[in-house]
Image (cartoon, helix red, strand yellow):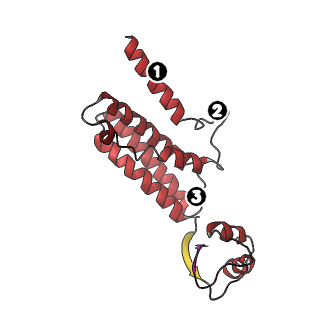
């Protein structure tokens, strides 16, 4: 009985670690500002394949699958919080997560968990579809000559408010010199 209690306690500890900050009542609750980073941290658990390390039918494989199921459930929840930068980013996050959801669904033997996970994915999908209508697309642009970021922003968008995004997105070393002759990434608003 003690062994069963220890396994349940260990599973709860891992669940608490994975879900850290995802409860709005937590002191360190996820915000729009840090949800993207939380997603990236949880995503690292998607790539771990317990069969590669443990082999065979080791009971720890079931535990590792439990951890991955918790990680993907929390990743889906985080996707509803993330303020996506572009349609491309929303699509990338969706592809990464849904690929793992599909893998987990194929391995599940629990009908209730299968249905709940599928329902959660459907709800997140509807949310992302709704928010994606407002998101810009990413495109590449090559300037003929080097220009200041403020000029590029004004020429492309009719406002200088996109200057910092151009600098950050393209890792521009100096805001007066957006390089000409090389592709830069820009947002295109529909």
Residue farthest toward the left in the current orientation of the protein: 56
User: Which label sits in the foreground, 2 or 1?
Assistant: 1
Residue highlighted by disc 2: 26
How far across and how far down the image is residue 117, in percent? 40, 41
For the residues marked 2 and 1, what is the alpha-carbon distance in whole angstroms?
A: 20 Å
Instruction: Give yes or no for residue 147 being in the magenta stretch.
Output: no
Identify the mark at residue 109; answer none if there is no mark.
none
SS of the residue at dot 2?
loop
Residue at image location 51% in from the left, 55% down from the top:
128
Identify the image quadrant of residue 162.
bottom right
From the viewer's perspective, is residue 122 above or below residue 71?
Answer: below
Dot 1: element: helix
Tell me which residue sits at (66%, 36%) in the image.
Answer: 28
Q: Earlier in the sequence, mark 2 or mark 3?
A: 2
Q: Is residue 137 left or right of residue 46?
A: right
Disc 2 crowd rating (10 Å Cα; few below 14, some 14-19, many 20+) is few
Residue 178: say if magenta.
yes
Q: Nearer the viewer, residue 179 or 158?
A: 179
Q: Which residues are magenta?
A: 176-187
Tag in front: 1 or 3: 1
Count neighbours of disc 3 (C-alpha within 10 A) and say few if under 14, some if 14 to 19, many if 20 or more: many
Mark 1–mark 3 distance (CA, rounded to whole Å) = 36 Å
- In this figure, what is the number of numbered marks? 3
Locate residue 104 relative to residue 152 in the image: left or right. left
Q: Please report the residue visible at 48 percent of the width from the left and 49 percent of the height from the top.
A: 124
The residue positioned 61% from the left and 55% from the top of the image is 83
Which one is earlier in the sequence, the residue at label 2 or at label 1? 1
Name the residue tied to disc 1: 9
- Secondary structure type for disc 3: loop
Q: Quadrant of residue 69?
A: top left
Q: Which residue is disc 3 drawn over?
A: 84
């Amino acid at each position: 009985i003690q062994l069963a209690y220890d396994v349940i306690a260990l599973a709860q500890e891992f669940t608490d670690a994975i879900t850290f900050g995802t409860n709005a009542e937590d002191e360190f609750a996820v915000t729009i500002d840090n949800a993207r980073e939380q997603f990236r941290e949880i995503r690292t658990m998607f790539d771990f394949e317990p069969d590669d390390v443990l082999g065979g039918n080791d009971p720890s494989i079931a535990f590792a699958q439990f951890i991955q199921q918790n990680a993907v459930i929390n990743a889906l929840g985080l996707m509803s919080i993330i303020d996506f930068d572009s349609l491309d980013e929303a699509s990338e996050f969706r592809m990464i997560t849904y690929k793992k959801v599909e893998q987990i669904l194929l391995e599940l033997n629990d009908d209730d968990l299968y249905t709940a996970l599928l329902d959660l994915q459907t709800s997140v999908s509807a949310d992302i579809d709704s928010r994606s209508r407002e998101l810009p697309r990413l495109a590449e642009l090559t300037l003929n000559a080097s220009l200041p970021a403020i000029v590029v922003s004004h020429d492309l968008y009719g406002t200088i408010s996109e200057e910092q995004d151009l600098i950050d997105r393209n890792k521009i070393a100096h805001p007066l010199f957006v390089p000409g002759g090389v592709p830069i990434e820009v947002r295109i608003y529909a």
